[in-house]
Amino acid sequence: MKCRLPGLLVASCAGCLALGAQSAPSAPSTPVEIAPDAQRVSVWQGLRIVTPSNRQLTPEQAAELAAGSEGRGVDSPDRVMGRGTTPYWALFSLHNPQSSEQMRLLAVEATTQYDNRLFERDDSGTWRQAKSLADNADGRVGGGTTYPVWELHLAPRKTTELLLRIEGPAIVRFPVFVYHPVSFAERVRRIHVAIGVALGSCLFIVVYIGSQRRYLDDRSAPLFICMLIADLVGALWLSGFLSELFPAVPESMLSWIGFAAYAVLLGCGCLHARIYLSSAVWTQDGDRLLRVLGWLWLGLALWFPLVFPVAARVLIVWGGTAIALILVVISVLAARRRIPLSGFIAAAWLAYLLVGSLFLIARVVDNPQLWSSNTIALGQATAVAILFGFAMSQRLMRQRDALVAARQEATMRQEKDAAIMHERGLLFAATNHDLRQPLFGVSLFADLLKSASTQEQRDAHSRKLDLALREVDDLLINIQQLASVHEASHRPALETVKLDALLAPLIEEYRARSEYKRITIRYVPSRLSIATHVPYFQRIVRNVLSNAIRYTDRGDRVLVGCRRGGGLRLVIRDSGRGMSEEQTRRAFDAFQRFDSGASIAEGFGLGLFSTKSLANALDLAVSLHSHAGRGTEFRLLLPSPGILPAPGA
């Protein structure tokens, strides 16, 4: 028993020492040294962090807890500690080894957090709250910072104790760094350049689409503009630029603006996709889903973040990613159905989906550095704006081209109608004048026929009377057919007939007419068949044969036949007087007569004009080749046998 007593005493002493060591407060972490030439110093390694349940702790009490056993460190500046629904306190100290004072900037590189406060212990041991740069701006527009920044004056060869308090619905991290003012200014400049690029790109697209909207009626354009503005506002909130721009606005209000912007983006995005992808045409269920989701998000925009600030942030991430996925799927299905430009809509929402997925992955692997940078937020906004802007500009350009084409077609139709009215005016004006001549001839030859004393005189006057009546008949027929050809709704009915069945009766008819001039008509029959409108086709042949006989001198000949070289052509060639080059150019114009030297003018100059109009109605090409004193050749390009033309198409 005596031998065991010393051992028991030693064990008891050791246990007491261990218990005392366990209950004693832990020593604070080593101060972070700020070298004079250091541009950016990491402070997070020296943090002692506590999360007390008591929200009413004073800085003195929080500092005592952080320095004690409850204080814990972090292994990464982006380690997620939780949500700031209860305050987080971080105790740390900075040492200035220099013999002169250093002016430095302390930054917490985390945006969208509600409440960030910094306390500094003075020489008397009292913790005093330091003013941030945003607080010093006194509400001046543009006087804030993208994330919380405080100006520090480190006394020479002294250690400054600091206490950081973070509270709010966002996730809490401690990316705490000390900057040299020049280095910080350079960093801010790079951020401003990125913001300027994003802001300039989005505003340019908005102005361009808005200017086109003045001339084009597209219901998706206002939704697109709302989407783009909302996307830009949301990105500026995530990047912290709204806090920098409006330092007097509380972060809770900026957070509400950010949520509302993304809710408007998602709501208008669903409604925009309905119109742009024409979902009502090919997927009734998808169209109904987009309509419900669109109005649901727009309904949540104003009140949800005010009532449920923490749930609002979760909803934006998970709900936004789900909406992006739905829109990508519907856009891909639209692309498979050949909906124009739907691929660009799919690409735009895919960019949003990738960033949202990256955020969720970062939360799972506990690495917010993957998504927390300003560059990612601004890059996403710029990419989405460019893709949506390109899709909308292409859509508006297509609509503009269609509008221009419709206006050009309307202008051409008006010009055509005006030309038709002009032609009709000329036609009826000339008819009023030229019809008097044959009617006067009919009256004259009838009187002469009554007073003729010999059979020879009666035969001569009868032939002239018959000729005058034929001219009247030809004029009235030409007027009737020209009027029907120029009707916009007129479409001649086609039928397949043999060429010989069309031409042979006409050849026999005009052989009888040409006998008094002793003109020989040579005709080569054809066994081919064509699709045509029989009355129009026969009127074309009659007009050409009538001209050939009229302008061919006594004893000459007229040749009629088909040729196959260069396409099937009907050729009517005479050996008559022919025409000059100038007359040939005007041959198909209305009221062109080239027999002014004759004692009695024959015809009204409507034959070839009528021929051209009838050929156009049948979609047939006509041409005329003539030489003065050597005759004229008329060519009519016929449709290939077995192929139906499309008149008026």
Image (cartoon, rainbow, N blue to C red):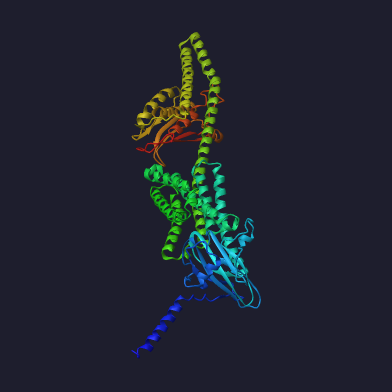
Asked whether residue 628 is in view, the answer is: no
379 or 114: which is nearer to us? 114
Q: Position of residue 314 (x, y in %)?
A: 44, 56
Q: Position of residue 606 (x, y in %)?
A: 50, 26
Q: Position of residue 262 (x, y in %)?
A: 49, 52
Look at the picture and state if 47 lies above or below 415. Answer: below
Q: Residue furthest front?
A: 2
Asked whether residue 136 is in view, the answer is: yes
Q: Judge left or right: residue 367 versus residue 98.
A: left
Q: For the point 44% across and 61% down, which residue is it?
A: 358
Q: Position of residue 8 (x, y in %)?
A: 37, 86
Look at the picture and state if 311 lies above or below 406. Answer: below
Q: Judge left or right: residue 192 versus residue 526.
A: right
Q: Which quadrant would residue 254 be assigned to in this image?
A: bottom right
Q: For the point 37% across and 33% down, which residue is it?
A: 531
Q: How many marks?
A: 0
Q: Judge left or right: residue 366 versus residue 594.
A: left
Name the quarter where the C terminus is drawn: top left
Name the quarter where the N terminus is drawn: bottom left
Q: For the point 63% across and 56% down, which residue is it?
A: 139
Q: Residue furthest bottom?
A: 3
489 or 534: which is nearer to us? 489
